[in-house]
Image (spheres, rainbow, N blue to C red):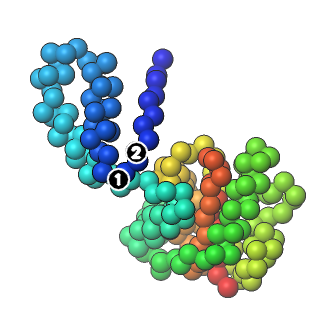
Amino acid sequence: MPRTTGLILRKPDDKGAVLLLFLRQISRHFPMPVLFSYRPWLLLLTLFWLGAVPAEPPAADEEAYMLRMVNYIRSRGCRCGDTFYPPAPLLRLHDQLTLTARVHARDMATHEFMGHEGSDGSRVGIRARRSGYPWRQIGENVAWGYPTVKEVVLGWRHSPGHCQTMMSRKYNEFGAARQGTYWVQVFGRR
């Protein structure tokens, strides 16, 4: 049966603790002679991985981190299903769209559902207007179960409909939120 081990990093430079945990976990699965013979390679791969993967931001910075990821995808263009979307203009973070996303993420988490229709029957356009966003174009992606910003954005990226929403030139503003493992992106244009 798979097991996981959690580790809370108190400082950005706690990479040594991650390396130690990784080596402890890997040593449970390989006999010591194998571990010793592969130790230089494991160390090298682990150090490469620690330096190459950006750390997830604190919760307060998740919206900005998600926007950077979406804008990176938009700036390069991408294939969504069978259609290639060329690079698109970058989105700007907008407070009212972030509020719209927060309200829906909280609603989904509170009522334990995932969908575009809120527990009160509202859709994204209604929720955006309630937040004070006078939209001409509006779109939304929702997800559940992803533990990190990176994983949820990559999940949307590999889903043709969600990817199309992220790549659409109809939108120039963005808001995002999570509540637990419920995620919402809102795209708009005024």
Q: Residues within 10 Å of mark 2 (few under 14, many from 20)?
A: few
Which is nearer the eye, 79 or 141?
141
Position of residue 2 measured from the top left corner of the image (x, y, whole percent): 46, 22
Task: Pick out the residue farthest to the front.
Answer: 10
Q: Secondary structure at mark 2?
A: loop
Q: Amino acid at mark 2?
A: Leu
Residue at image location 50% in from the left, 49% down from the top = 148
Q: Residue 168 is drawn in which quadrant? A: bottom right
Q: Residues within 10 Å of mark 1 (few under 14, many from 20)?
A: few
Residue at image location 56% in from the left, 45% down from the top = 146
Whether tag 2 and tag 1 are in contact, CB under 8 A, the answer is yes
Cα–Cα gap, marks 2 and 1: 7 Å
Which is nearer the eye, 172 or 35?
35
Q: Residue tagged by mark 1?
A: 12
- The disc label shown at residue 9, or none: 2
Quadrant of the image for the C terminus?
A: bottom right
Position of residue 178 measured from the top left corner of the image (x, y, whole percent): 62, 55
Q: Secondary structure at mark 1?
A: loop
* Relative height, residue 175 to residue 13 (above, below): below
Q: Amino acid at mark 1?
A: Pro
